[in-house]
Structures are given as structure tokens and as C-alpha cells.
Amino acid sequence: MRKLLTRGGVVLALLASSLTVGASASAKGVMDDPPTDKVVIDLVAMAGSGCRPGTADVAVSPDNTAFTTIYSDYLVQAGPGIPVTDGRRNCQLNVLVHAPAGYTFAIVKVDYRGYGLLNPGAIASARANYYFQGMTQSTFSNHPIPAPLDDNWMVTDEVPIASVVWHPCGELRNLNINTELRLSRGRSTDTNFLTMDSTDGSIQTMYHLAWQPCP
């Protein structure tokens, strides 16, 4: 059975509690404990067919080890009588992370969650790309979501510490997060859909952070 979240204050309460579990990174120069000063994340802009204005938001975890993007209108569908264009949705978020003085951060793990009704033969995937403004380094992922499915789904990106892209010390650079859902009916003769949200609330995409002191 589908696991549902409710709107409003309950969603925020669940978000605050779930965000307390973050990523840990163990490598030379990477902190086991994040900075204790408050981290502020501003959602500068959003665009795309999967996150129309007002349908996405971000929040930082109380322990500074993760931040979450919450979607409320991110849906692809495919089947008889459904236009092919409904099988692709994307969201481009531009966020500004205000790191405590003397620290830099990197994304080391990303969890994507949603719900799907995929009949045998349907073809679905979740894609993502995230990078700091003005930098050529970026991280790209493509996760097939196999059919059949009638449940919540989750995929995870894990970036080795040696390969992570660190935010430049002492600079304010926006973090660009581009996600995409794709769905085609394939051999399926029924209606299929895939969300990065739910009809009763919001499913969250969590970005786990690693920290290290600036030189």
C-alpha cells in the first residue's frame, strides 16, 4: 500500500525529524562533525515543468548534514490517450548555501523518493545533475526504475570523497540542481505514472553534505 504524507504542519514536523540523519564522510580533511553555526539555504529560483512557481521548497537539517527539496507537483504519465510529452518533466532549482565562515562543503549523497504505478513493459527513469555556478565540474546520474511497480520508490547517488566537487572557500556561488523524470508506456497497454510527490503531501529529495575547514 502507498505510504502517504499529510500536508501542512505534519509535513514540516516529519521533515525536521527525518533530516536529523545525515551523511558521514571519513577521509583526510573531511570533518566527522559538521560546523555548529547555523547554515542558511535560500531558494533563489525554480523553473521547469515539474516545479512550477510555488510547488517546491528547500529546508536544511538541524544538524547541518543535509538539505531537502520538497515537491508538490512533479508527475509524469504514459498510456492510451496520454500525450507523449506528458512522459517527461524536469525541475531546475537554484539554491544559495550560506556556509559558516571558514568552512566549505560538498554533496556526497543524494536520495530521491517518489511513488510509481508502472505496469509490466513500462519504461521509467530518474535523472539528476548538480553543480556550482561557474564551475565546469558536475555530477550526473541516471537511475532506471523497473516495472512492475505499485509503491514508493527510492534511488540513491553516492559520490566518493575523492570525486566530490567542493564549494570554493570564501565565495558565494549558487548550487544548481536539475532533476528529471521520464516515462514511456513501452509494451504496457495500461495507464502508468511516476511522481516525485504525492497527492496527499510531499515526497522529499535529500542532499547529504560533507564539510571541511577552508585552508
Image (tube, rainbow, N blue to C red):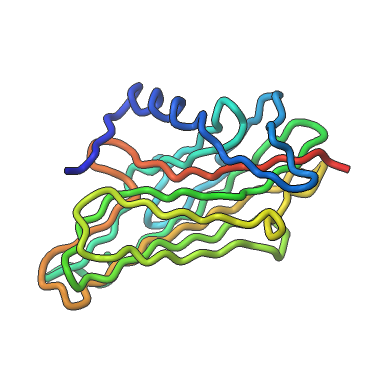
> Position of 167 compared to 90: left or right?
right
User: What residue do we see at 17% from left, 69% from top?
Assistant: 120
Q: Among all residues in the image, which is located at the extreme right?
A: 215
Q: Is residue 102 above or below residue 191?
A: above
Camera-side residue: 55 or 132?
Answer: 132
> In the rendered view of the protein, which quadrant contains the C terminus?
top right
User: What residue do we see at 27% from left, 43% from top?
Assistant: 198
Camera-side residue: 1 or 179?
Answer: 1
User: What residue do we see at 57% from left, 43% from top?
Assistant: 208
Residue 96, horizontal then vertical, whole percent: 64, 42
Quarter of the view holding residue 72: top left
Quarter of the view holding residue 100: top right
> In the rendered view of the protein, which quadrant contains the N terminus?
top left
Quarter of the view holding residue 170: top right
Residue 91, horizontal then vertical, whole percent: 45, 55
User: What residue do we see at 65% from left, 39% from top?
Assistant: 97
Number of marks in the image? 0
Residue 54, horizontal then vertical, whole percent: 41, 40
Q: Is residue 181 above or below residue 32?
A: below
Q: Is residue 64 above or below residue 137?
A: above
> Position of 38 compared to 81: left or right?
right
Residue 33, horizontal then vertical, whole percent: 69, 32
